Amino acid sequence: MGDPDFQDGRWEKTCREDYWFFLTDGISKDLSVHDYIDIYIKWYEVSTFEDLTIRVKDFAKSFVDTIHEPFLLLDKDKKVIYVNRSFCDTFKVTVDETIGNVLYDIGKREWDIPKLRTLFDDFLQKKKDFNGFEVEHNFPTIGHKIMMLNARIIEAEGRPEHIILLAIEDITDIRKKENELKEYEARYRRFFETAHDGLLLIDYNTGRIVNSNPAIISMLNYSAEDFKGKSLHDVGLINEVEFQNVLLNLKDFGFVYFDYFLAKTKEGKTIDTEIYLVDRTKLIQCNVRDITERKKTENELRIYHENLSELVTERTRELNAKIHELETFNKVFIGRELRVIELKKLVEELEKEVASLKKSVL
């Protein structure tokens, strides 16, 4: 690596070369707060060299001023001697009202926190860095926030007093997501333990069972320890060939459904089940539902419908026979009625003839 080009002074190939590389190449990296602290320490340390030009100092300061995280430099009395733009933007303060103030007096004294005072006193006494100190506070200007503080004491050769570098990171969203995840995990755990369906969690990579709920233990009569480390086939469920097909379908669709599967208990007893498998990224959730009673009811209904159909057919046959009898009876009855009517007409005609004969005789 060649030396940087400076107007005056020479560039010594010691820690300065490493520092220049860190500044120029490191800027493009995704640096953490600790990386920024290291950069600032290097800047502070190399700035003691007599031949370090104003150009490099200004470059380093400009670089620190662009750091996303709020950043403070404090003297031994905890007074602010430098504040970066991010701190001012985050906490809605100006450089003028921040520089020269003790940390606890910044803004509306939101940093005057007993635990922070104790931490700083211990920190200055032992001169031991602290990392990850969390401050949860309702800030007047930005509301409720959780801030993580990291501090280091910087001591450089040729400087009589040390300075304190304080980096601040807003972790409110991180803690919020962590709490949401914990709540989700707690809800899922309650669901997992109390579900009526049998549930198994399977490692996506190995295909081995990592957890089982009480319902599946009761259903298949394996203990939790029996399930752990086994494949689904080992516990009377899906065989290895089918499971490989399941994995392919999970990647494409996210779930697989078996509407009927004949599972086996530890003792070899068969159980009518339906099985859902759901992709949970690193795990596969296997839901096993005992449908023995449902299948029994379905069979009873099927038999009932078959018997009902036979009964309807028989009743229809009987009804048709009755109808035929009625039709025959009607024909006979109507024929007899017609015969009576004909006889009545014949009698009337005979009576008329007799009456006529009597008249003629007289």
Image: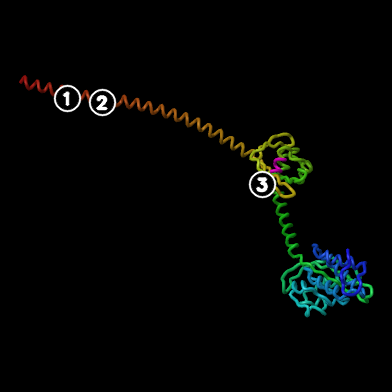
Q: Nearer the viewer, residue 59 or 351?
A: 59
Q: Secondary structure at mark 2?
A: helix
Which sits earlier in the primary sequence, circle 2 or circle 3?
3
Q: Is residue 246 magenta?
A: yes
To which residue does mark 1 refer? 348
Q: Is residue 339 magenta?
A: no
Residue extent of the magenta highlight: 244-248
> What amino acid is labelled 2 in the image?
Leu
- 10 Å crowding of disc 3: few (<14), some (14-19), many (20+): few
User: Which residue of the protein is positioned furthest toward the top in this rendering?
Assistant: 361
The numbered disc on residue 253 is: 3
Q: Nearer the viewer, mark 1 or mark 2?
A: 2
The location of residue 102, given as percent across then percent down, is 83, 78
Q: Nearer the viewer, residue 8 or 181?
A: 8
The location of residue 139, given as percent across then percent down, is 74, 72
> What amino acid is labelled 3 in the image?
Phe
The location of residue 167, given as percent across then percent down, is 82, 69
Q: Nearer the viewer, residue 189 or 8?
A: 8
Which sits earlier in the primary sequence, circle 3 or circle 1?
3
To which residue does mark 2 refer? 338
